[in-house]
Amino acid sequence: MTGSASSKARILAGECYCRTVGYAVVDGFEYALNCHCSNCRRTTGSAFKPFAGIARDSLRIVRGDDDLMIHGDATGHDAHCRRCGSLLYSLVRGGAYVHVAMGTLRDDPSIRPTGHIFVGSKAPWHAITDDLPQYEGHVVPR
């Protein structure tokens, strides 16, 4: 977390299920969406993954760095807790952003998901019941 803007921003806490890995992230997310792609469904074991996107340097691991399990490489990966398997965040957009799994946040972020992406491959047993916009594939955040 860098810069004077980050030092004035509210900091949110997040952690995995077993509380081994903890992180801090600036409450300055640029976008939030619900992803229904098959990869997000498999990695969360859920119908979709609510995530919030922010610049990579706005997230810091504060506990359990050695217990992170990384699937991918330095420019794109999913970061899980090695002990409990919780998906904490995904490194995306060439390594410049993280998509924080909103379910791992302990604190309430100021942002809410504004749409559903990859509904073209959503689970057939799941019905989207809110009024948020739905996109067949990916939408490019701002």
Image (spheres, grey):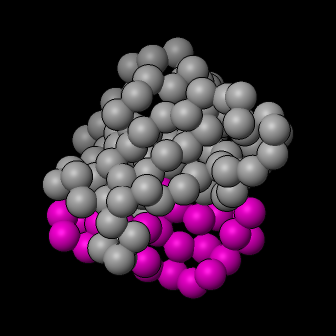
- Residue 92 lies in the magenta-colored region: yes
Identify the residue at horizontal 39%, vertical 43% (top origin): 14
Compared with 38, 6 (above or below) is above
Q: Is residue 42 visible?
A: no
Q: Quadrant of residue 104?
A: top left
**Would you say residue 38 sits in the magenta stretch?**
no
- Left or right of 124: which side holds 24? right
Identify the residue shown where x is 55% and y is 43%. 25
Left or right: 8 in relation to 51 = right
> Residue 88, image x and y in percent?
40, 56
60 lies left or right of 56: left
**Magenta region, main secondary structure:** strand
**In this view, 12 is above or below 100:** above
> Furthest-bottom residue in view?
73
- Which contiguous range is marked in magenta? 70-97
Front residue of this view, candidates 50 and 28:
28
